[in-house]
Image (tube, rainbow, N blue to C red):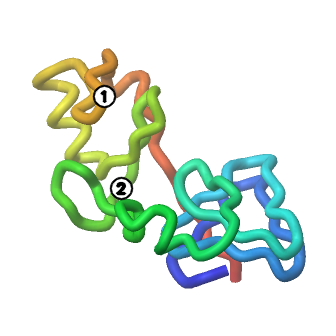
Amino acid sequence: MRAGSRLLSGASMENSSMLYEHTLLTSGDVADAGAVYSGWPAKQIDGPWDEKYPEDIGLVCPICHVVPQGMAVTPGGHLFCESCIKGAVSEHQKCPLCSAPAAMTNCVKVHPSSMA
């Protein structure tokens, strides 16, 4: 597991599996031995990640363009800083990325935990 990767409560990893930086493995998921995962929610990838998905190399909030702080996920699965999405949905009542209806009451706060 790389620095910056997270397992949410209830997730686990087999020996020799790897999560790319800023990857979140959800509760109940198990990373298969020898597999590589990236993204939120984590998806298994084959081969070099950087070549297949150059637009997803870093995890950034699509509103402020920095690593999300106090993260929240919209019903459509888009990850933002909690303060950024709170301002956006209170003003427009929709997701800034996909325009699906959104409110803070249906956004989920993300509490990443680190494996020690």
Q: Residue at x 24, y 51 (%)?
A: 62
Please, which residue is most extreme toward the left here?
91
Closest to the observer: 59 or 82? 59
Q: Please state, as top left, top right, bottom left or bottom right, where the C terminus lies in the image.
A: bottom right
Is 68 positioned to the left or the right of 30 in the image?
left
In this figure, which residue is indicated by the disc labeled 2?
Answer: 70
Is 36 positioned to the left or the right of 63 in the image?
right
Using the rendered view, name the quadrant where residue 25 is placed: bottom right
Dot 1, crowdedness within 10 Å: few (<14), some or many (≥20)? few
Marks 1/2: CA–CA distance? 21 Å
Is 82 positioned to the left or the right of 25 in the image?
left
Q: Are marks 1 and 2 in contact (CB under 8 Å)?
A: no
Amino acid type, callout 1: Cys
Tell me the SS state at disc 1. loop
Using the rendered view, name the quadrant where residue 31 is placed: bottom right
Q: From what the image shows, is residue 81 above or below residue 101?
A: below
In this figure, which residue is indicated by the disc labeled 1?
Answer: 98
Tell me the SS state at disc 2. loop
Q: From what the image shows, is residue 80 above or below residue 4?
A: above
- Residue 16: horizontal and vertical position, in percent? 83, 82
- Residue 7: horizontal and vertical position, in percent? 67, 63
Q: Please state, as top left, top right, bottom left or bottom right, where the N terminus lies in the image.
A: bottom right
